[in-house]
Image (tube, helix red, strand yellow):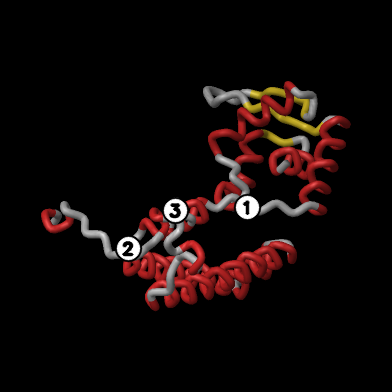
Amino acid sequence: MMILGLVRWMQPVHGYDVRRELLSWSADKWANVQPGSIYHALRKLTEEGLLRTVATEQVGARPARTTYEVTPKGEDEFETLLRNLWWNFAEPIDPFTAAFSFLPAMPRSEAAAALRNRANLLRAGIESMRASLQSDWVRNTKPVHVGWMFELWSARAEAEMTWCERIAERIESGVSYLPAELANAEGWSGRRDGEERIDPTRNNQR
């Protein structure tokens, strides 16, 4: 949707300009749009009839540049994708959730330290976003809704930062990872925590 939407906004437009605009948005970090895949995506969208080529130009020894614009089919597809994302909610994929599901496999002290480290990283990100919101870069050169996006990211990060610190305290307190009914139940032995695990190779690592 990002590439289709940008072509729609900037048309007729070269793939280079689409790539530059997406990178200026840092879309590779929050929209999973990888710079190396943009030209391939443009060609694929063209093959599917969502885009059409307007012209191909070559200046000197530079690589040829193709100019794109959106087709009526592409307009319909963009509108469908846009409204689907506005009106529906999908949990974002977070690799940390997969790691946290194996919490008992981590020594308590390390798990708590890792959560506090995550909280510190989130705090640094929040401070950076707040500084950006107060900067002339956002205030004078970006649409107002870009600042609103920063506010959303900051609010999410603050919530997770608080959660990390709270869970770190619970882990350090020694609270059991299993309810009493499952503490001695068959099949749950791998999730009974807590003993500090000693890495036999750690003492040899300097």
Sequence-first tag of 1 and 3: 1
Residue at mark 2 to residue at mark 3: CA–CA distance: 22 Å
**Residue 108 sits in quarter:** bottom left
Q: Position of residue 68 (x, y in %)?
A: 74, 30
Q: Could you tell me which secondary element the residue under label 2 belongs to?
A: loop
**Residue at the (39%, 61%) spot, across then down:** 192
Residue contact between numbered discs 1 and 3, judged by CB atoms under 8 Å: no
Foreground disc of the pair 1, 3: 3
The reply to whether callout 1 and callout 2 are in contact (CB within 8 Å) is no
Q: Is residue 99 above or below residue 14?
A: below
Q: Earlier in the sequence, mark 2 or mark 3?
A: 2
Q: Nearer the viewer, mark 1 or mark 2?
A: 2
Say which of 125 and 131 sits in front: 125
* Other residues around mark 3 within 10 Å, as few (<14) / some (14–19) / many (≥20): few
Residue 22's place in the image compared with 166, above or below, is above
| Residue indicated by mark 3 | 186
Vertical order, 75 against 48 (above or below)? below
Which of the two discs, 2 and 3, sits closer to the camera? 3
**Residue 106 can be seen in this image:** yes
Kindly identify the amino acid type of the residue bearing the numbered disc 2. Pro
**Neighbourhood count class around disc 2 (C-alpha, 10 Å): few under 14, some 14–19, many 20 upward:** some
Counting the numbered discs, the total is 3
